[in-house]
Image (tube, grey):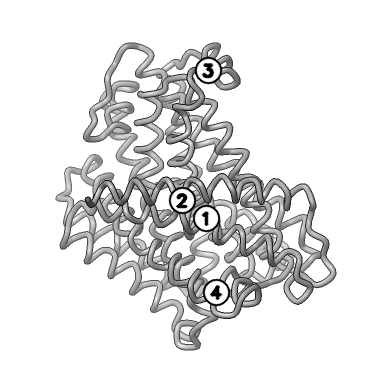
Amino acid sequence: MAEKNSSKGAIVGAAFLMATSAIGPGFLTQTATFTEIYRASLGFVILLSILITLVVQLNIWRVIGVSGLRGQDIANKVAPGLGYVVAGLVSIGGFAFNIGNVGGAALGLNVLTGLDITIGAVASGLVGAIIFISKDIGGAMDKFTKYLGALMIVVIAYVAFTSKAPMGQVFIKTFAPDEVRSLVFPTITLLGGTIGGYITFAGGHRLIEAKITGEENLEKITKSSILGVSIASLVRVLLFLAVLGVVSAGNSLDPLNPPASAFRLGAGEIGYRIFGLVMLCAALTSIVGAAYTSVSFLKTLSSTVNQYEKYFIIGFILLSTITMALIGRPAKLLVLVGSLNGLILPLTLGVILLGSKKKEIVGSYKHSNLLITSGWIVFAITAVAGAMSLRAITALFS
């Protein structure tokens, strides 16, 4: 019975790890900003991003789960040495985003308590590191992400309810948006924040750690991936409705902090405090997810990292914290990493799709033709998105 409960806890925990890794400070800001610009038509973007996310996660989780191999090991079997490239890109991207996650947690603390941003960054980093001091890292991480994830859903739902979004308009514009071409950029951006870089692999790697692998566990793996996508999607929909209700009432968001102003306008001073709590929860769970998953990409490639995994994760968090405390707001760094994630997604998805056909990776398992076909379509879309990101980053630094 204890083993069954542990397995169930890991399945739900993996889903929350993936979902809360996706729900970071960038997630909140992007959704609020684009909602103000595109209004109800953003519903179309959110629906499209949910469908694409589902295709990506089902492909990656199922192949990883059945094979019992982490992303970097599958990459090395597809092409020798490719795993080192993938691991390097994911880890560097995860580190840079973690700097922003620490900053987001500091901002949340500042809103809640008035604590200085630098002190808040250090405190947040220490909280993240403490999670991994536990002897049962996986269990502690599962509980941490589940509880904070559930809290986020409740408080965002409260603001969504009080802001009274025009639901009829949302339904119409979700399926018949204004100027579809103008929605390409927000679609690309939201995808990068939801399934870019390390986020794609967070839950799958957690299931490997919990030894929930093999074709006999395929149903559990699939359920966990769908649950993860559902949680992240629910938060995005609720946040979209909360902000839409505010801007539809004729309010303008503060460009310096769009989500904070949306919560304040939607639910008064208590709404502003709720934003601080949401930002803190989102950032702390993203800190944990980024550190755990980034290091998991290195552990099978280095015996030293594998032996001292706990200390490498803690070091990863502390180094992110120190960097945040020293350089403050790493705006250009986060934009650069956003571009990098635009390139990582098609690379990692392509590797998984190629690996799904190799017997040395998946054995006798037959991967769904529907998932493979839809996966290659998404690969093409995200490859174009990556090229667009490169042009944008070149313009930024020119």
Q: Amino acid at mark 1?
A: Leu
Where is residue 97 drawn, in percent x and y? 35, 57
Q: Nearer the viewer, residue 203 or 327?
A: 327
Where is residue 236 drawn, in percent x and y? 49, 35
Q: Earlier in the sequence, mark 4 or mark 2?
A: 4
Q: Earlier in the sequence, mark 3 or mark 1?
A: 3
Classify mark 2: helix, strand or loop: helix
Question: Which residue is the site of mark 4?
Answer: 82
Q: Is residue 30 left or right of residue 54?
A: left
Per the model, the C-alpha gap separating discs 4 and 2 is 19 Å
Classify mark 1: helix, strand or loop: helix
Question: Which residue is the site of mark 2?
Answer: 386
Is 169 placed above or below 143 here?
A: above
Question: Which residue is the site of mark 3?
Answer: 170
Q: Is residue 48 left or right of residue 239?
A: right
Q: Is residue 126 left or right of residue 9?
A: left
